[in-house]
Amino acid sequence: MFGDRYTDFFLNLELKFSKVRIGTQVFHLEISPGMRSEKHYIEFMLFPELLHLIEIEREKQQVEDITWKLNIKGKIRNRAANGPFMGENPVDAGAEFKTSTTEWKGALGLMDYQLILLPNELIGELETLRKKWGFWKIDDVIAKFLDIYRGEHIGISQLFLMTFYETKSIRDKLADFADKSATLREVRILSPYLDNTGAEYLVKMLKNNVKVKLITRKGDDKKAKVEALSMLAQQGAEIRYDNMLHARIIIFDDIAAIISSADLDSEGLNNQKQAGILTFDKVVIRDAITFFDKAWDKADMR
């Protein structure tokens, strides 16, 4: 309760899993007078490299539950509502809590995964290939083997695309997919800016009953963008907003993805010097879909 004083919290938080340091954050909060209690949440980002380290450590220890350790150090400074300093108290505390394997898999979006037992020597070989090929997870290595076994994309699996003088290959590939979109189910798009130049390709997909999900930035009241978004919404596109969006990605089902610097507007597709790739690589596309879906869940609906 903070009835008659201002309270400043300066906390340094460190989160660890076993010997793996997840991260630290400095937390500053001022609570003004008032008879109430407050609850605040701080997020620690779990990057793919950290997730991999955690899984390795968990497998080594052969544990089902993951034990987290949270250390909190800092100080609490108090001053009266009328201004005078009333002293400070140090904070040095620790806490432990557990996450079950089911909770852990759910948080990582791995509920559809099944347990497969492999001999240790095979795991060692797969781990060596994972590091050699620069993958994050061993299942990426297995996915690559399956692609080769199926004979998929034995030829060129990546194409360099550009908007450069007379070459408009980013726009041309987008047009190709729009023309053949009757075979597609869903297209996911990340584009901070757009206008009717890019939207017309998405409209063609929508008219072919393709589900279109778009994340863009809001607060941009340029007439061309407003008109493009209105047209897409009328055609049934799902649109969400994130002002921290910087990526430019178009994902066609789980078949292909265009990852480039180009926005879906006239400048990006026709005038500016842009570059990117068209990829058919299953691992890359899967990771792009995961990135999009997480961004979609956190984006604003209006």
Image: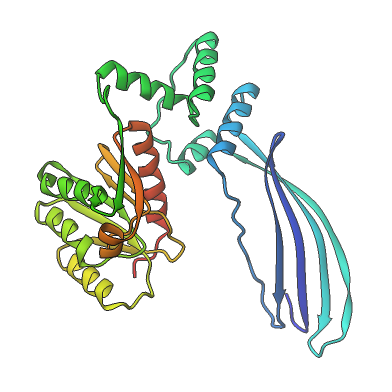
Q: Is residue 110 left or right of residue 66?
A: left
Q: Residue furthest bottom?
A: 82
Residue under the point 70% across and 63% down = 27
Residue under the point 31% across and 77% down = 222
Residue 52: x and y in percent read 56, 32
Residue under the point 24% across and 42% down = 253
Q: In the image shown, does 216 or 10 lie closer to the viewer?
A: 216
Residue 101: x and y in percent read 53, 34
Answer above or below: position of 207 versus 70: below
Q: In the image shown, does 65 or 142 lie closer to the viewer?
A: 142
Residue 274: x and y in percent read 35, 53
Q: Indicate the quadrant where residue 85 lies.
A: bottom right
User: In the rendered picture of this protein, how many numbered marks are placed on residues?
Assistant: 0
Residue under the point 11% across and 44% down = 180
Q: Is residue 209 left or right of residue 129?
A: left
Q: In the image shown, does 244 or 110 lie closer to the viewer?
A: 244
Q: Indicate the quadrant where residue 158 lies.
A: top left
Q: Is residue 187 left or right of residue 3?
A: left
Q: In the image shown, does 113 or 258 lie closer to the viewer?
A: 258
Q: Residue furthest front?
A: 165
Query: Which quadrant of the figure contains the N terminus?
Result: bottom right
Answer above or below: position of 159 versus 244: above
Residue 298: x and y in percent read 43, 58
Coloration of the structure image: rainbow
Q: Residue furthest right?
A: 87
Query: Which quadrant of the figure contains the C terminus?
Result: bottom left
